[in-house]
Amino acid sequence: MIRTKSVKSPIEPARDGLRVLATRFRGRGLPNSRFDVWMPNLGPSEDLLRSVLDGDVSWAEFRRRYSRELFESGSIDERNATIKNHGQKFTLRLLQELAARGPVTLLCHCDEDEQHCHRHVLKAILERNV
C-alpha cells in the first residue's frame, strides 16, 4: 500500500511503514528521524520546482513534465549499450515491490492537505504498472 503525507505530520510507524522523503531538497533542520530514506531523485528537478512555485507553469503542465522527468534517460544510458537506466524506472519498481510487501509512505514538505503536490503524482505513477 502506498500512502502520502507531509513530513511534518505525526509519525505512525505501523501505518506509515517505510517513510520515503521524495524531495529534491532535504530541508534545513529536518531531523533524520522524520523519514527512513531520502530519495532526492524522485523529486521534481530544480527548474521544474522553481517554475511551478513561481506560477510559470500550470499544475497540469507540471504533472506532465514531472512524469516525463521520472522516465527520462540520461547520459548514463548513452554510456551503457545493453542495460539502460530509463530514468527512475528501477527505483519506481523497487518502491512498487516494497509497497506490495507492506506500507510505503511518500513524504514531502507540502502541507498534508495540499492537493497540488508531486507526491500525489508519484503515488499515481506507482499505483500503475511501471
Image: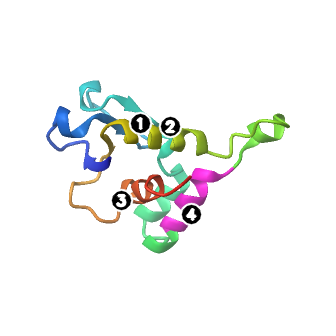
Name which residue type carries label 1. Leu
| Cα–Cα span, label 2 and label 4 | 22 Å
**Disc 1 or 3, which lies upstream in sequence?**
1
Q: Which mark is residue 81?
A: none
Residue found at x 49% / y 71%: 57
Residue annotated with mark 2? 94
Residue annotated with mark 1? 98
Neighbour tally class for label 2: few under 14, some 14-19, many 20 plus, Cα within 10 Å: few
Residue annotated with mark 3? 117
- Residue range highlighted in magenta: 62-72
Task: Please report contact status of discs 3 and 2: CB closer than 8 Å, yes or no.
Answer: no
Apparent side of residue 95 relative to residue 18 in the rendered image (left or right): right
Residue annotated with mark 4? 65
Q: Secondary structure at mark 3?
A: loop
From the top left corner, tell me how far across and down residue 102 is, in percent: 32, 37
Where is residue 27, by image quadrant?
top left
Vertical order, 53 against 7 (above or below)? below
